[in-house]
Amino acid sequence: MTRQTFLTQNRSIFWFLLALAVFVLIVTVLSEATGNGMISTSFVKTLGKTLCLMLVAIAMDVVWGYTGILSLGHMAFFGLGGYMIGMWLMYARTEIIVAESLRAAAIPPTPEEIHDAIGTQIFGVVGSSDFPLIWAFASSFWAQLALVVLVPGVLALVFGWLAFRSRVTGVYLSILTQAMTLALSLYLFQNDSGLRGNNGLSGLQNLPGLDAVPQSQVSIAFFWASAVALGLGYVLFAWVVSGKMGSVIRGIRDNESRVRFLGYHVESYKLFVFTLTGIVAGIAGALYYPQAGIINPNEIAPIASIYLAVWVAIGGRGRLYGAALGAAFVSLLSSWFTGGGVPSIPLGFYTIQWTDWWLVLLGVSFVAVTLLAPKGIGGLFDLITARHAVPERVGDFGPDKGARRTVEGEEER
Amino acid sequence: MIKSLKLSGVAAAALFAAGTASAQDVSCPIKVGVLHSLSGTMAISETTLKDTMLMLVEAQNEKGGLLGCELEAVVVDPASDWPLFAEKARELLTVHDVDVIFGNWTSVSRKSVLPVIEELNGLLFYPVQYEGEESSKNVFYTGAAPNQQAIPAVDYYLEELGVEKFALLGTDYVYPRTTNNILESYLKDKGIPEEDIFVNYTPFGHSDWATIVADVVALGEDGKQVGVVSTINGDANIGFYKELAAAGISADDIPVVAFSVGEEELSGLDTSNLEGHLAAWNYFMSADTPANAEFIEQWHAFIGDDARVTNDPMEAHYIGFNMWVNAATEAGTTDVDAVREAMWGQEFPNLTGGTAVMGVNHHLAKPVLIGEIRADGQFDIISQTDPVPGDAWTDFLPESAVLKSDWKDLECGMYNTETSTCVQIKSNY
Amino acid sequence: MLRAFFLAFALVLCLCLPGARVEAQTQDLQSILQTHADEVASPGRRSVGTVIDALVASGLPAVPQFLERWADRSVYQRESDGLFYYAKENGDTYSLTDISTGADAGTAPSAEMTEIRPNGGVRRVIATALVQFQLSDPDIARRRDALDAISRSPEADQLEPLRASIEGETDDDLRARKERLAGMLAARYGDTPEERIAAIEALSGALSVDVRAVLNQILSSDTAVAAALPEGANIARTLTPGEDLTEAEAYAQLVAADLAPAIQSRDQIKAALTANIADGRVGGVPIGALNTEDGRARAYAALAGAGTVPPLVTEEDRNAALAAHVFYEEYEEPDAAITDAAREALDEVETRVAMNQALDLGLDALSLASIYFLAAIGLAITFGVMGVINMAHGEFIMMGAYTGYVVQQIIPDYTVSIIVALPLAFAVTFGAGVAMERLVIRWLYHRPLETLLATFGISIALQQLAKNIFGTQARPLTSPSWLDGAWVLNDVVSIANIRIAIFVLALIFLGLILFVLNKTRLGLEVRAVTQNPGMAASMGINPDKINMLTFGLGSGIAGIAGVAIGLYAKVTSEMGADYIVQSFMTVVVGGVGNVWGTLAGAGLIGILQKGIEFLNPSNTLAAQTYMILFIILFIQVRPKGIVALKGRAAGD
């Protein structure tokens, strides 16, 4: 298969990358750092974070919409990526401060002294001063960067291997992944875990050694980085879900046993997809949290992963751009509603305050999407391109209509 | 790296110059940012504080505003989501251009906004009792530091109740962890051996307390008087107190002193079985002073519900807001640096009597009150100290004992008195 | 400040006490109180003794009554003249009673009177002082108070009056208690060693905390260090550094006892080096080379060699010092016969306590298991039998609890309200379950993953709805008084009544569900529809109706569980979320589709959690984390749960 056919088969790549590029250009022109300042720095950060969420939503779509594994653990991988980069950010920033303050002493500091002082600074807030073992590599940027990939990757690999090996499927797998997420967040909540417990890692937006660079520039740089990551992630996953690989994983989603009988090693495929998406989630997290400024165990709580599934479902499973749109749409709408930007509706006897009622609306609309519009927002694109509705078929053909697609977004003739 | 630090110095100088330039003119209306969660888990506690701020702003406007300007409250909702606190703080300071922010409840939310406030040279008033170990140039802490709540409460245990064995029970997060560390170290100084200090941490919202209560009872087996110091947070207290009552533990046998249980929390409980257990705060609604009566009346009138209680963080906002108004009036501007300097030594009467004084370490000097729970969910004040100056860095942990905060003369919030150097100007996040 | 003042005041009083005592006979109560007015008005535990001594010494008949009322906070001080009165609130005024004579003293406005609030410590001192008056009081409540006071703060001089009062005691329970207390006091304060040893041996059959307290206090010991074991001391045991205490601790003891030089910390070395900088060098080592530990050690050694600083304490020095000394614990009680008897008695008691603690832990585990079972049993029906993932199950629990709360607002009698609330909660959540099944779930029977998501949507909507209606603050759901308190087997084993009630409720539901599923027509139809809806329908069963009823039943039970959980813990909008993951775990671990499996799952999780908590008592969060990890691994080993179904019913 040549590159040419891959792109023509996946026309959405072109449109998605084009839209992304245009969007990045507009934001850049309107931002405070590089443009006329119509978009505030805090909103640039919000947009940058949204791009990261879109990336993790695409990963979720591949693992759920294409492979049929409803993972309720991908936000845990996302958070782990954030923790890994956060460790370096905190360490390096504190190292600069400590070195500066120790330099004033009459005797030059020893490396041990600096290390201990950094420990006191970082862990003083949780009443400790010693570095736990997991901070062993925190002083090295490259090592932590490798851990951004390795920690979520290895966790996904080990967990996936255990789960797929014993043929845990369907809702059981969902519950198992949720249990993993809960265990991880409970573990991180403990102070003894060595990642500052409930407080987590904070001040991540201040990049070490870059104090002089204003946040407006930092934010736009992260925005660009997130956009690049999203673009690359989109191409990567479009490649994964196309071709033979794509057919096999869709086959696994629709009927695992039949694929197994055809001689494919189903577990390996599932493990590959699960691990790859876990790694991408970790990378997205590593880009997200320096923009958010703080990461703590709350971010990893099971509810976050469920929201991820909600975004993908509302955006439309089984098509990458649908998941991305869903994540952007729901998370931005959510911040608009909870931010008090939506006017209240007075009903005479009662006034609907959207900060109170937004979650009710989200919950109900989510049920409605599941019941009435399983294709989600992505389904709207079928209207634009005037695809033909598939005639009703009876019988058990798999979980949903996406099952019969060989080409992304296109129905089988 | 040295170069980058120099650069940062230049940037700071530029920022400072910009600050003083705008100090000349006060732009009307003066905006007061309110950064309290109105949704999510912290909403119940923080919504009350938002209402308190609206009440105070309204009352100030009735008195003629500030510096000839109307005050305008800008309310945002960080929705109990810690990263969102940083985002909303940035929005308040850059988009709404507020002159001061009153907000935050949890420590983690404060840690989240700190870098933003310091970067943009904002001004934050933080009204809740907290674990200390912090002093930011841009934050005024109107709640209690550990030496204004935990240490006096333990002193009360040692002196008045003769407690010899301590059970430190807490929810597993930063405030209980740090407070208990400080208390452990303090108790050891006071001659309580390590084996007589039992520490336990439970998750948020914990409900299965039977085993822990049995463990606490068993502590009494060597004949020493046992006392519980509770930093249990929020809903978990309900199960804890219910289990205490079920086990028939009266305050005479094993007293419990709580640092996070106030009038608001007791309203979710039947307190008839809890009479005599203790809480330590800087304010109780039952304080019998004219100022407090007036405040309660004002609050009831504003909120339109006579059943609503007042609590300690509300008083902290009351003092903080009035101090800020007086400081801005003195400085003749709302410029952050000018107001900050005018804040040092500001005095304002407490609702419980006496006068609160703002120290150069940005902490208040306030009296410490110990109350016994009554059957009606209020507290009998049984002990009130002289004003205690808040200590940013505790004297009872070896790393912190050498640290000192003085923004006036030393111009440093983390000054090492041993090496006579400023460890850092910005805060630890 | 205040305390210092009181101390000074007490000191002055002590000095002039002999004089005061002579006068006391002629004084009335009020004037004694006025002499100590400040101390009476705001008493402190350590200083109140002087007032009480003066009062008791006066011998006035009104003193016991005054002490009681003082502790009960019914003594008030009039601000204008500082006189003390007994007062009763009467609207805006207080009606006063004269303290000395007991005569009516008119009324006073509330602003005039200050309530005197002795704190808990003072109340205890007062209670101890009252013991001598109360031990033989005709009022049984007062006698009981006296015994409480003795057991709270036993003192040597209580032994005689206590023994004297046993004779005249009419109440059997109290007499037994008095004898027990007298035995405990005798063990500590008896006159002769023989008497004490006899008393100690009599205690070995007991179990209670206060008996253990007595024995432990007899056995209290101090750690000490010396070059050799002292002659004639009553040694409890010798300690070996590295085994009984760490070497660092042992050395710290040596330092504290001035038997060894202190180890220089890194900071101290640095400070010493800093203090001895000369011409950019320290001890001949250039400052620039001091940025390693090695360089610093060389510089310090040079300084030590020159005698400017104390020599570095090396590892060998430390070990030599430790080897040269003996560490031991010495009993405070000099008589070895008594400590041996106490040790023997305590060992016996402790063995029994350990067994009882295990039993207590077992009860706690059982109780936790029954709570998990109750929370999960509804789920066992909807998920286990019907295969429907209901993420809103937790919210049904919450709805049940709020129903209980609302009922209590309407019906103030707690017993009646609980009786009403239980069926009502069932009805409410049954209705909600049926509505949900009709509106949402029946469209998704073949798409289990989407059921999960749709019910999750319902879950967040319901949770927020509850917040909007009831607020985020926890709501009180109070159990009736007959469920208050605990079932006390002995001083170690006890369990709250409410937990027993939950256990019983769980048993009832276990029986009920088994009965419904296995013995009724409905159960037969449910099982039929579960196994093969098409075949069941052709047999004349209406699968729609059966699904609806089954789902309603599962939800209704969740509602009842909600009332029970609300009674023992809390009622908040998030309480359901606390139980949902655990409930799914319970069902999955136990084995889907089987009520017995759910029981086994709940039992396993409850016992496991308590077991881990026991091993690591200071961190409950860790227990939960490890439990979930265990469950994940357990499912690896037995993917179908403890009680796995075989055959057709096992199909996914």
Image (cartoon, coloured by chain):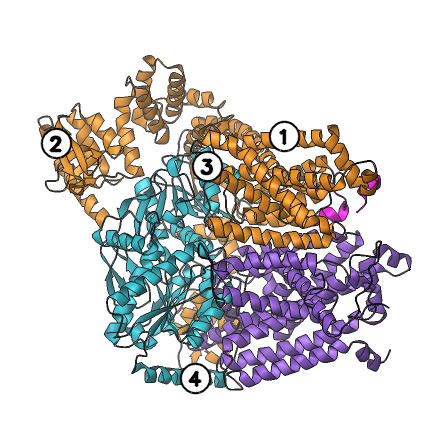
Chain colours: A purple, B cyan, C orange
Residue C106 image label:
2
Cβ atoms at labels 2 and 3 below 8 Å apart: no
Is C645 magenta? The answer is yes
Q: CA distance from mark 2 to mark 1?
A: 62 Å
Tell me the amino acid under the disc marked 1: Leu
Tell me the amino acid under the disc marked 2: Gly
Q: Nearer the viewer, mark 1 or mark 3?
A: 3
**Chain ID of residue with mark 4:** B
In the image, the segment drawn in magenta is C632-652
Q: Nearer the viewer, mark 4 or mark 3?
A: 3
Residue on which disc 4 sits: B11
**Chain ID of residue with mark 1:** C
Q: Quadrant of the N terminus of chain A?
A: bottom right
| Pointers 2 and 1 within a single chain | yes
Residue B152 lies, in percent from the top left, at 32, 50
Residue placed most toward the observer, A366 or B250: A366
Residue C340 lies, in percent from the top left, at 47, 28
Residue A268 image label:
none
Let me know if residue B216 appears in the view. Answer: no
Question: Is C431 positioned to the left or the right of C113 in the image?
Answer: right
Residue on which disc 3 sits: C408
Tell me the amino acid under the disc marked 3: Gln
The residue depicted at 68 percent of the width and 64 percent of the height is A312
Tell me the amino acid under the disc marked 4: Ala
Q: CA distance from mark 1 to mark 3?
A: 25 Å
